[in-house]
Amino acid sequence: MTTSLLYDTEATPTSAPLQTPEIPHANSESSAPIAAPEVVNPTLAEVRNPPGTDALLGAHSADEYTSLMHNVVDALGERFRTTERAASAKDRSGLQAAVDAVDLDTAGVGNAEALREVDALYADNAVWFHHPSYVAHLNCPVAVPAVAAEAMLAAINTSVDTYDQSQVATLMERRLIDWTCGHLGFAGGDGIFTSGGTQSNLQALFLARENVLAGLADHADESERGGSVDAEPRRGGPDLGEPTRRDQLSRLRILATDQAHFSVSRAAFLLGLDAEAVVTAPTDRSGRMDAEALNASLLAIEANDQIPMAVVATAGTTDLGVIDPLETIAEVCASANVWLHVDAAYGGGLLWAPQRAHMLDGISKATSVTIDFHKTFFQPVSSSALLIRDASLFAPTIHHHDYLNPEAEAQVADAEPNQVDKSLQTTRRFDALKLWTTLRARGASEIGSMLDTVCDLAADVRALLEDQADFTVLGASDLSTVLFRFTPATADQVTCDELVPLIRRVLFRSGRAAIARTVIDDRPWLKLTLLNPDTRLDDVTAVLDLVRATGHGILAGRDLEGAADVDGAATEGGAA
C-alpha cells in the first residue's frame, strides 16, 4: 500500500498575484468607430493570462506554483525526518505493477492530485542516499542550499548554451570554471560543465583524439615542405606518408589501468577507435598505475607503429578508491609529449580537503581533468565539469550555426560568450548555480572538511574489520571505499564467494541496508562507499552486524536444506 504525505491544496495565495496593465482595445468605447464589421478579439491581458490555465508556470499560475511547491517541500521534509530505511522493502514485481497501473493516456487529474500520486509512487519507494545504512555506490547526500538552488534553476529553466538565453548564468558558470582551474593550477585553462564523469571523459578523449590527429597532420605538412620539427605535437611513428584519417584512427591507443572507469572503453568505442585501442597499463600491488611500467608501454606502442593518443590516470578508482601517482605519471607523459587526462570524478574534491589536498600533487601537469561535483562536493545530480589546461585545445569542439552562434558574430571584438562552442550538449541546464550557492552558503573549506570526514570514517571502518575474525578486507583506500568479505571459519572460499551476492540481495530487498558488490581478480567482494559525513562508526557497525547475521542465516538455511535432502534420500532408499 502506497502512502502519500502531500495534503490537499486550497486556493490560499501566499502573495498578491502579478497584475497586467490594462490596454484599451481598438474597439473600446474610447476609440473612434470604424466602418469594417466588428471583430471580437481577445485583449492583450487575456492572451497573456488565459482564464483557467495553470499548466505552465507564469504570472497567471504563480500562486498555484507557490502552493504546490510548499506542499511538496513539506511532504519531503517529513520524509527526511521519519525515513527509517535506505530503500523500499517492496519487491520489484509489486513496484512494476504499481507503475503499470497508472494510465498515462487518460485525462489529467490536476496538479495537486498528480503530485499526491507521484509522492506515493516515487517518494514512498525511493532509495535514500542520506540514510546511514545506505553505503553502496558513489551517491552522496546533498547540500541543502544546492537543493534550493535546484528548485530555482528548474523553475526559471535557463539554458546556458548561448549568452542570449542565459546572460548572467553564463557569466556565473564561467567564473566557477575559472575558480576551479585556479585550484587545479591551470593558469590559462578553460572548461565546461557536463552531465557527469562519463560525458566529461568522453569529451576529454575526443579533444585528445582531434588534437593528436591535427598534430600529426601538421607534422606531415612540415616534413613535405622539408622543414625541421623541433618537437612533435604528439608522439608518433616515423615518416607517415599520406595516411587517411581512418588509417590514423586505427593506430591510436589509450593507456589506462584495469581500475579505470568503464567510460574510458566506452569513449574509445564511440570515438571510432579500434577494439584494441585501450591498452591496459600495469599497476602495482595496491592497484595504482605503475609509472615506470607506463613508460615501457609507451615505448612498446611506438615500436609497433601505433600512436599513444592519451594516458588516463585515475584520482579515485571506483572500487579500490586509490589515486594513481599523478606526479610521476605526469613526468612520463611530459617526456613522451602525450596527452594526460586525469579522471578525478571521485577524488577531485580533495583539492579543497585540508588533510588530503596533497594527494593530488601533480594534477596541475595534466592536460585535462574530470571533476564530479555531484560526488565529493555533495551536489544534486547532475554537476560535473571538464577542465582543460590550455583553452586553445577546445578548438575541435567549436561549430558555428547561423541560428545559434554565428561565426561572424564570434569574430567581433566584444563577442558574446556562447558556451555551446565548447560543449557537446546544446541545450544545457544551469547546474553551476547549485555549486555557486553551496560555496556562498557553506564555503569550500567546509565542503573539503566533510570529504576528509568520510575518508577518516573509511579508515576507521577498515581498522574495525581487520580486527574481526569473520571478515576479510582488501587493500587500503585513499578515499572512502572499503572492500570486504564475510569469511566465517566454517565456510570455504567458494562458499564465501557465493555469499557475496546473496548477502547484498537479501539486505537490499529488506530495505534495511544498501551495500554494493564488485569483483577484483575474479573474486567477489562486498563494497562500502562512504559519502555521508553524518554517518558514524556505530551506523556502519550496525550494517556490518546485518551482514554477519544475514551470512549466518544463509548458511543455516543451506544446512537445513542439506539435512532435508539427506533425510529425503534415506526415506526413498528405505522405501525401495
Image: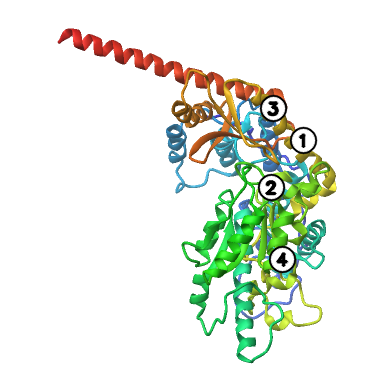
Amino acid, disc 3: Ala
Amino acid, disc 4: Ala
Please tell me which residue is depicted at 66% across the width and 31% down the height of the picture.
131
Q: Residue 421: x and y, percent?
A: 68, 71
Give the number of the mark in front: 2 or 1. Answer: 2
Q: CA distance from mark 1 to mark 4?
A: 34 Å
Provide the residue designation for mark 3: 463
Provide the residue designation for mark 4: 334
Mark 4 Cα-neighbour bin, 10 Å: few <14, some 14–19, many ≥20: some
Provide the residue designation for mark 1: 453
Please tell me which residue is depicted at 60% across the width and 39% down the height of the picture.
137
Q: CA distance from mark 4 to mark 3?
A: 38 Å
Q: Residue 97: x and y, percent?
A: 43, 36
Residue 181 visible in the current orientation: yes
Mark 3 Cα-neighbour bin, 10 Å: few <14, some 14–19, many ≥20: few
Q: Label 2, secondary structure: give it.
A: loop
When the figure is inspected, residue 184 is found, relative to residue 77, above or below; the finding is: below
Provide the residue designation for mark 2: 323
Q: CA distance from mark 1 to mark 3?
A: 15 Å
Whether pointer 1 and pointer 4 mark residues with C-beta atoms closer than 8 Å, the reply is no
Q: Label 4, secondary structure: give it.
A: helix
Q: Residue furthest bottom?
A: 225
Q: CA distance from mark 4 to mark 2?
A: 19 Å
Q: Which mark is residue 128?
A: none
> Along the line of sight, which residue is nearer the eye, 290 or 43?
290
Q: Residue 27: x and y, percent?
A: 69, 71
Amino acid, disc 1: Thr
Please tell me which residue is depicted at 50% across the width and 66% down the height of the picture.
273
Q: Quadrant of residue 42?
A: bottom right
The quadrant of the rendering that contains the C terminus is top left
